[in-house]
Amino acid sequence: MSAHDESTEPRPDLKKGVSLDALPDGGHLVGTVDKDNVLLVRRGDTIFAVTAKCTHYGGALGQGVIAGETVRCPLHHACFSLRTGEALGAPAFDPIACWRVERDGQRVIVREKVEAPSSAARVASASTGAPASIVIVGGGAAGFAAADMLRREGYAGPLTMLSADADAPYDRPNLSKDFLGGDMPADWLPLQTDAFYRDANIDLRLATRVKSIDRATRHVVLENGDRLPFGALLLATGAEPIRLSIPGADGPRVHLLRSLVDARAIVDRAKDVKRVVLIGAGFIGLEVAASLRERGIDVESVTPERVLFERVMGPALGAFLQRLHESHGVVFHLGATATKIDDRTVTLDSGKTIEADLILIGVGVRPAIALAEQAGLTIDRGIAVDEYLETSVPGIFAAGDIARWPDRYSGDRIRVEHWVVAERQGQAAARNMLGQRKPFRDVPYFWTKQYDVTIRYTGHAEKWDDARVDGTLDGPIDKVACTVTFARAGRRLAVATIRRDLENLRAEVDMETGRP
């Protein structure tokens, strides 16, 4: 059973109660309270009752992992407090509900829902020594998560969020997946409603670009000349797509996919095209290939790699991904480079030409660090930050694709371009801007969905000397289930899984707690 499947077995009515014997210490079960599915968890003498469904995309929490007083979702690894229901770790932001539990002899009975704890104490705490004002530069994953957490932690001062994007923060990972494939309407993409920013008193400014940072006076200077003061500043500018410098790369049939504006343009063009050429075969490129094939569009992919993802995921997973896409009709041109784009053709370095109604370029991204460089922050293949995500200048923090931080688990300084990492770093930076001094120690996690296959990847293995496969990558694709463990000098650094969601989540908890 996959992690998002719901059991069809009858569930106990928790209002009538269940025997304590059915709930051993550390155990959990899912029952019903009226029309709600409720997860019952026992930790010692304490029994918790919470909503059994993740508030991110509805993952079944009963099929997740209980760690301490938290429950982790097996789909995208969101983390919730069992005691309060609070969403402790992205990608979930909304809490889960809690119910009051009582004991009657050897029976456990679930009563009424309980209200979330008051935030008054957090407001008082955040008011002590908090920055006079906070400015966030960036409207993506890290920027949104930081703004949300600042208000949740009780920060009541002026909070300004400057985004170069034309749209309010949205679920960027789904641009290349369900949205492009036609399975998700656009109104599902926003991370929050317009009312959220208004009610939270977040000054969200869209289509706004920052020209410079004045460190001396602690102001952000906008391109229109406006100057915004800051007591603390978060740089969350993300990454920008690499553009090809070949003839025709700026032609009218050539598109990039980075923003919702880009995605809308591609969806609009996809209605009238029959053949697409993808230049680049990274994760986003292959997700795009899968989405376009689901629309019935012929897809050819051009990449200089001879084995897909050999450096990142090893030859076995790379060969499987190639087989997966070829089984759906994608044609690969491996070990090839595009040298010229004409009106309807792409020319390769071999001299071969490929006809295309639409060309999509996805050859990677680079961290958007120009502002940091101008401000004189320390740069290290990104913006260098400490374990609290603070840059070389006190009061200026960085999070997301631009931040290179000391990773406790691997012992390396790393920079990761993953959505969940950016969100969690935004949350950590928010807490540290308020003076909480909590090191960022989350384990990197990402997922990629291509057709009906999802690969989940926990950890970070920039360099590895062993990629061990447990399970099978051969045989019928719908039967493939495996774990690939990436290690260096015998130490596990990362785990990739297919159809083993729970194993992947357990690996994250092990790494988080320092278990080898």
Image (cartoon, rainbow, N blue to C red):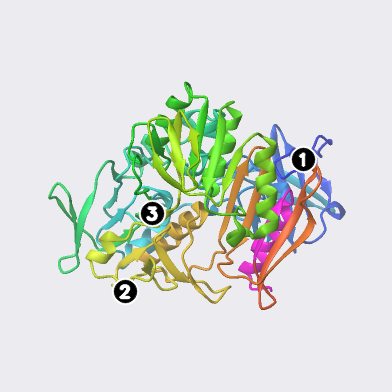
Let me know if residue 81 is in the magenta part. no
Q: Seen in the image, is 94 located left or right of residue 239?
A: right
Q: What residue range appears in magenta? A: 494-516
* Image coords of residue 138 (percent x, y): 33, 51
Q: Are marks 2 and 1 in contact (CB under 8 Å)?
A: no
Is residue 61 or residue 137 the one in the foreground? 137
Q: Is residue 118 above or below residue 45?
A: above
Q: Residue furthest left?
A: 225
Is residue 234 or residue 268 the one in the foreground? 268
Q: 10 Å neighbourhood of mark 2: few (<14), some, or many (≥20)? A: some
Q: Quadrant of residue 56?
A: top right
Q: Residue furthest top?
A: 272
Q: Seen in the image, is 156 located left or right of residue 352?
A: left
Comparing marks 3 and 2, which lies closer to the viewer? 3
Q: Which mark is residue 238?
A: 3
Mark with earlier residue (2, 1): 2
Task: Kindly state the secondary structure of the residue where label 3 is placed.
Answer: loop
Q: Residue flagged by tag 2: what amino acid is it?
A: Ser
Task: Kindly state the secondary structure of the residue where label 2 is placed.
Answer: loop
* Image coords of residue 406 (percent x, y): 47, 73
Q: Which mark is residue 478?
A: 1
Q: Residue flagged by tag 1: what amino acid is it?
A: Asp
Q: CA distance from mark 2 to mark 1?
A: 49 Å
Q: Residue at x 73, y 39 (%)?
A: 5
Q: 10 Å neighbourhood of mark 3: few (<14), some, or many (≥20)? A: many
Whether residue 100 is visible here, answered yes or no, is no
Residue topped by disc 2? 392
Q: Residue at x 76, y 42 (%)?
A: 477
Quadrant of the drawing holding the C terminus: bottom right
